[in-house]
Amino acid sequence: MTDLGAKDGTSGVADPPDVDGLRAALAAEMRGEVAFDVTARALTTMDASNYRRVPLGVVRPRDADDVAAALSVCRAHGVPVVPRGGGTSIAGQATGTGVVLDLTRHMNRIVALDPEARTAVVQPGVVLDRLQEAAAPHGLRFGPDPSTHSRCTLGGMIGNNSCGSHSVAWGTTADSVRELSVVKGNGSVVRLGQSWRGAPDGLRTLVEGELARLRTGFPQLPRRISGYALDALLPEKGADVARSFCGSEGTLGVLTEAVVRLVEAPRARALAVLAYADESAAAEAAAGLLPLRPLTVEGMAADLVPPDAGLPRGGAWLFVETGGVDPAQARARADAIVRAADVLDALVVTDPAGQRALWRLREDASGTATRMPDGSEAWPGWEDCAVPPARLGAYLRDFRHLLSTHDLRGTPYGHFGDGCIHVRIDFDLLTGAGIRRFRRFSEELAELVVSHGGSLSGEHGDGQARAELLPRMYGTELVGLFERAKDLWDPDDLLNPGMLVRPHRLDENLRFAVLPREPVDVAFGYPTDGGDFSAAVRRCVGVAKCRTTTAADAGVMCPSFRATGEEEHSTRGRARLLHEMLAGEVVTDGWRSTEVRDALDLCLSCKGCRSDCPVGVDMATYKAEFLHHHYEGRRRPAAHFTMGRLPAWLRLIDRTGTAPLLNSLASVRPFAALGKRLGGIAPEREIPRLAQETFSRWWGRRFKERVRRMMREGVYGPEVELDASPREVAILWPDTFTEYLSPSVGQAAVRVLETAGVDVMLPPTVVMRKRTPRAGESVSLSHHPWSVGARGHVCCGLTYVSTGQLDRARAVMRRTLDLMGVFLDPDVHPRPPAVVVLEPSCAAALRTDLPELLHDDPRAARLASAVLTFAEALERLAPDWSPPPLDRPVTGQTHCHQHAVLGDGADRRLRAAAGLTGSLAGGCCGLAGNFGFEKGHYEVSKACAEEQLLPAVRAATPDTLLLADGFSCRTQLEQLAGRKGRHLAEALAEALDQGVEHGVEQGVDPEVDRGSD
């Protein structure tokens, strides 16, 4: 096993003579932040490519003057500079060994927007979606839109000459650039435009001496991104220096401001989904649709589409978007495309929500493609080759043959209308033999692309992944011109050296080389990663959907990032730190790392990334794993003892009958303040009141009263005719929150389930074990001899898992499995009875954490398979039951664990059946179990709630029902909004009781116990 204890390591590069002097000089000359610490460096070692370089430090300039100052200092110290935007580059050009310029922190404004001129002035750190939002009220938009539009920056788009799905209509980023303000390597500021405006000395002479070569040396296709666009400097093209600068990948200058063109956005859109037998058939058809002037012609194959996506029957699809002045015109154009296309089947979607859902399938493909259908890993590297659209079908057939020749797999998708194909390939980048095959394949694919008249890069730039192979596309003479142009712009080779010209080898600096070769000793099973923690961490390929700044685009994932804006609080940032922890070069103290601990501290364990991250990174599990090792043999924070062991404390309080005393003390401010201080609880929080009677005690009292009543009324007499129809039986899980803090939820669930015809029982409190039969004793499967063991209470182990107390969690979970053993024995119950869990976080823990932590115990998987939410239980066990009519609008919170793990389809159907209209807020409430109660987390917790939940509650009408199935969500509502949320079971039970009071509930005697004693 690999030891992740303290290690001595180096930065991976030869340090310049005076790193401290470099840092001091930068701090003295700049107004922005200068960060040479471990965290800042670790966060920027990688982009979304296969490559890794360790920088000396990161600076965050405030303006162009800061950029010029940084370049001057670095030039004086002989240190290279790499400008960086969203860090989503796929070819490695956003990484470097010198100083990284983070242009997203401060230089992220829209300086001006002129609707009449249809232009905008933007800084390089502006996220594309923010520009789209600013332009939309004027009926305008920026044309290019990569799938990373919610987090990529305009500076990065200009640096790579990005395109996106609408390039068939509006071209590349270069087509939308008017003027650029740039700081050159020598610190001078220039304004680039047409007619040689801003060109460095000697560039015009260079171009005019090579006119013939520049006119004939570039392939003519819409997605030619590779190399420098020196042909934009031809006189017949206006000698456009700004356009020529696009796609230079930070090697010629640092962009500080851009004037960009906006286009008129269609007032209405329709999406035609065209189905074909396979990707080749779709590719052959794509070019033929271009004369109909669609807005998009995107292609995907079945490998990347979930079976429930709702697409028309086929093996591959084209997503063809049309626009119009009104919905009718957009629909008519879509229908015309369907008629013109030779398809197996087709679907036209005009509903905006339906279109967004389908586009999310396409946009998430850059992440989902990183896992093959069998779970094996796939990587970028040949992500975006482009050929003339008319040759795409032939190219794809040759590409598939080449893959087969090298025994590789990949699923092409992308911009079929432009002949640009994205693909992730299952390269083995961990072994020497695999890397050699990666090189051979890359060389042969470059020849194949060139043979079809294509470009090695059709969207993401060359970077390290392809620059080495540019001579195969352009020849050595034209590549020599690229080198001469670079030297004119940047004679000191200060800016992003090793990219585009005089490049690094494509098989150097691979980010996997530093990871341990042996599996790391971990607690969780990581079943989808072969039990390998390194493979789990490798899942993050830098797509950075977690950096999306609005919850509407990101889902639940990374609420703390949206609250702080800090990369280290994104899923990607935390994954990068874990990667560097495993590497041991930048983060040198392994599991003891304070940098990793601090980054994970603001992870809410919401599990949003488990479903919202396109590659399924599960940071909540990684956090629990890290905390388990970090505090092994060490003193833990007070909150881990108070809230992490909450079930044990609450059981002790119940046994001693001290709940009233503690409630009284908690209402006295000095005692409450002292308790919160000792317990590591945020002083701003109120301590929830404990129930006077636990749910289990209520259940026991109710059961005894019912038995007495049945005995008193002679229910067991011979005159009683038993109901011959069998009733479904469910085990209602008394989770910690329902048991001790909100037993009314459990009481309401019993009321509803029994009314629906489901008999409810609680889990056993004693362990029943099979004993060896005595000699001559008759035994059958249904009458096996049992012995009574220890007493106990079931628990999902959630609080122990979330605080990384995994040894205790396993012990609690094994005790739970022992208690449930009789129901999990396949000889007794071939199929375990339904286990209804009312608290979503506990249900999620039983579904996922239990089998992943006790992966060696088959009972764990059986219990996990039996877990149902309240709505799922009603849908499965009482399919013919109709809920009482509530007929009210609804708002509130879908629990983040329900969103990520459980799904809320059954809940939405149940709410609709009960007449509840509207939808619940997404995102995360911000309390997230122990997180929002821990000292130091209150402001972030509150900010998370303010993102969606609290605004939705404030906007609700007085008659709106406020639903929140999670105890944390209800607590957050009560403490921040002063409103009481209800579990759906409580709302339905209240409606049932009102029906009884009015004599309208059928089949229920009003005198019979209603389950709410």
Image (spheres, rainbow, N blue to C red):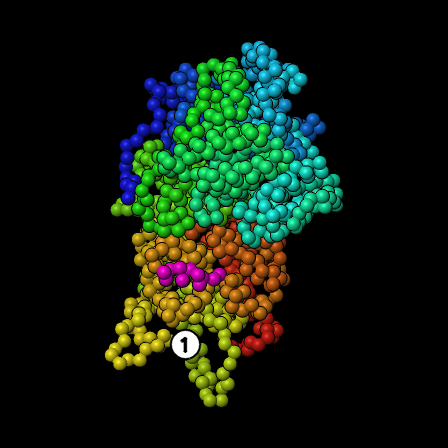
For the residue pair 234 and 976, the one nearer the viewer reads as: 234
- Look at the image and say whether residue 300 sits in the magenta stretch: no
Quadrant of the image for the N terminus?
Answer: top left
Callout 1 crowding tier (Cα within 10 Å): few <14, some 14–19, many ≥20:
few
Relative to 57, is 719 on the left or the right? right
| Residue at x-position 44% and y-position 47% | 375
SS at badge 1:
helix
For the residue pair 967 and 110, the one nearer the viewer reads as: 110
Q: Position of residue 35 (x, y in %)?
A: 40, 28
For the residue pair 70 and 849, the one nearer the viewer reads as: 849
Three-letter amino acid code of the residue under disc 1: Lys
- Residue 258: name its quadrant: top right
Q: Position of residue 196 (x, y in %)?
A: 61, 14
Q: Which residues are magenta?
A: 858-869
Q: Is residue 934 above or below residue 97?
A: below
| Residue at x-position 45% and y-position 19% | 494
Task: Check disc 1 and report the residue beneath it.
Answer: 704
Asked whether the viewer can see residue 920, the reply is no
For the residue pair 871 and 447, the one nearer the viewer reads as: 447
Q: Position of residue 287 (x, y in %)?
A: 66, 37
Relative to 213, is 642 on the left or the right? left
- Look at the image and say whether residue 867 sits in the magenta stretch: yes
